[in-house]
Amino acid sequence: MSAPWTDDACSLVDAFRSGERSPREELEATLAAIERSDLNCFSHIDPERALAAASAADLSLPFGGVPTAIKELDQVEGWPDREASLVFRDRKATRTSTNIQRLLERGGAVPVGQTTASEFGGLNVSITRMNGVTHNPWRHGRTVGGSSSGSSAAVAGGLVSLATGGDGGGSIRIPAGYTGLLGMKGTYGRIPRGPHAYWSPGTVVLGCLARSVRDAARFYDVCAGPDPRDPTSLPSHGAWERSLGSHDLMGRRVAVIPSIGGVQLEVGVEERVRGAAADLIAAAGLVQVDIPLELPNLAAQWMMGNLSTLLAGLGDRWPACEDELTQEIAFGLRLAQSMYNLDTAAVAEAKRVELQEAMADAFDQVDFVITATNPGPAFAADATTSSPNGTILDQIGATKAGKLGFRGVMAGVRVSSAFYSKLPNLLIEQATARLPDMVAMGALTIASNVYGNPAVSIPAGLVDGLPVGMQVLSRHHTDALLFDLALAAERTLAWPKVAPGVSQVPASA
C-alpha cells in the first residue's frame, strides 16, 4: 500500500470491514504520506498513540479505524494546546473537547495529529508565526483559507479522509470552498463546544471537513447532541446519515444571490455559482424566485466584540505578549480595546437584529438561499489578509514607527471616546465605507454565524483552475433538509474527492 485512501471516510470503513484494507496499514500509509507532503498542514503528529488506536480499532463503530486529523484549536488531553500562537507554545491540553471525545470513543476514529489553523481562529488565511504557511493542494503557493486551514489541506490533499473543523465566521466553509470540499456549518449549538465553553462570540459551530455528504452526516451522528457543559447545545435524533435522501425537494423555493453583504466577487465567480445553481435547481426540481436580501455589514463590530474571549484567554500576558502575536491579531486587540465601548456594542446589537429580520424575511419566502462561499478562488498562501492588495494595517505594521504611531492613535481614540462615546463607531463606519477590503474577510459567511442558521459550502467547479464554493443557506434546524440538497448537488455536480495530482489508490488496493 503506497498511498492513503482517496475516497470518502465511509467507504474506507467499508473497506476495513470487508478486509480489503486494515486500519494499521492505512495509518502507516497516512504517516508516510504526511512525512512526504509539502503542504505543511500538520502542526503535531502522535504516531505512537495513533498506531495503538489503529491496532485496537473497533470496526463496528461509525469511523472505526479511520485516520483522522484534529484541528489544533480543538483540545486533546496531553497534546499541545497552542491555539496556533507563539504565546502558548509550551502549553499542553489538560482535557479533551467534547466533540473530539465523542469522535474517538463513539466514532472509533484514529487520532493522527493536529492540523494547522490561523492564530486563535481569528483570520481566514493559512499562515501563522507558529506554523508558517499551509499550502493549497490544488496549487502550491495558494491559500487554504482559515481558520480550519490544515484540516482542509489534509483532506483535499489525500492525507486523511476526515478532519475536524470549527466555524465562527466561516472557518469551515471558507477553506472548504478554496479546496473543493464539503463544508457544513450546522444550526448554532448542533455540536457541543464543551467543556469550558465561552458564550462569546455566540457564533461558533463545530464540524468537519469532508469529501462527501454522508461523511458529514455520519459525523453529526457521532458528535451532535446535548452536553451539560454547553448550555447552547441542541438535541440530536442520531439518524443523520440514515435519513439522507428522505426529503422531497421538488417545488421547494430557492433564491440565487451570488453576493450578499455588499461583497464584490472576482471575475468568473458569479458565473460559476449561477451555473452550478442552475444545474442543481433543474436536477432537484426547485423553483427559483427573486427576493431582495439587503444585509448590514457588521464585520468590524463582530470582529471587535469577539476579541473579548481572546483577552480572557490571554489574561495578564497582554499586552506584554504583543510582539509574539500575528500582527493582524495584535492590531485587532488594540482596535477593540480602544474602539469597542457601550455605544459600539449598541450599534452592533442593532445591526444584529436588523440582520436577523432580513434573514427571517428571506426564509419566509424561500427554503434556500444560494450565494458564493468566497469572493474569488484561493489567493496567495503567504498573504496575511484576504485582501489581494493588503490593507492599510499592513502598511502601518511594515515599520516600527508605523506600529508606534498606531498605538498612539489608538490611545488617543480611547481617551477621546471617554468624552465622546460615539467617536469609535463613527470611525468604524467611515473605515467600512472607505476601506471595504478591511471588513470583507468572511463577509459572505458571517451572516449565517450571526443568525445561527445552517449553511453549507458545496464544490461548484473551477475558476482559473481553482475550486469555487457554492454556499447554500437554509432555516434554523433544517440541517437534514440542507444535507439532502447537498446530496442532490453531489450527485449532479460530481466533485472530485481530492485535488488533482494526489496519488490515487485503486479501489481494491
Image (cartoon, rainbow, N blue to C red):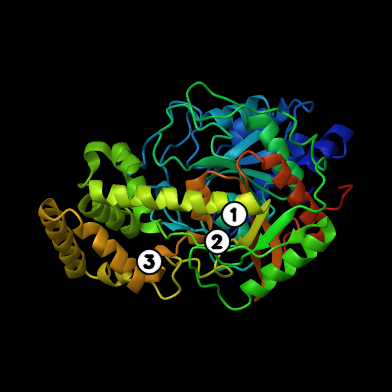
Q: Is residue 47 toward the left or the right of residue 389 in the image?
A: right
For label 2, the SS is loop
Identify the amino acid type marked 3.
Met
In the depicted view, which residue is nearer to us: 464 or 28? 464
Most distant residue in the top direction: 228
Q: Which residue position is annotated with label 3?
A: 438
The first of marks 3 and 1 along the sequence is: 1
For label 1, the SS is helix
Establish if 475 lies above or below 315: below
Q: Which residue is drawn at 44% across and 40% down?
A: 202
Q: Position of residue 342 (x, y in %)?
A: 24, 46
Q: Which residue position is annotated with label 2?
A: 293
Instruction: Name which quarter of the figure residue 293 lies in.
Output: bottom right
Badge number at residue 178: none
Q: Is residue 295 toward the left or the right of residue 364 in the image?
A: left
The first of marks 2 and 3 along the sequence is: 2
Q: Is residue 156 toward the left or the right of residue 378 in the image?
A: right
Q: Is residue 86 visible?
A: no
Q: Position of residue 153 (x, y in %)?
A: 60, 55
Identify the amino acid type marked 1.
Ala
Identify the amino acid type marked 2.
Leu
Establish if 11 lies above or below 105: below
Q: Which residue is drawn at 79% across and 40% down?
A: 244
Q: Is residue 412 visible?
A: yes
Label 2 close to label 1 by CB (< 8 Å): yes
Badge number at residue 362: 1
The residues bearing labels 3 and 1 have C-alpha atoms spaced at a distance of: 27 Å
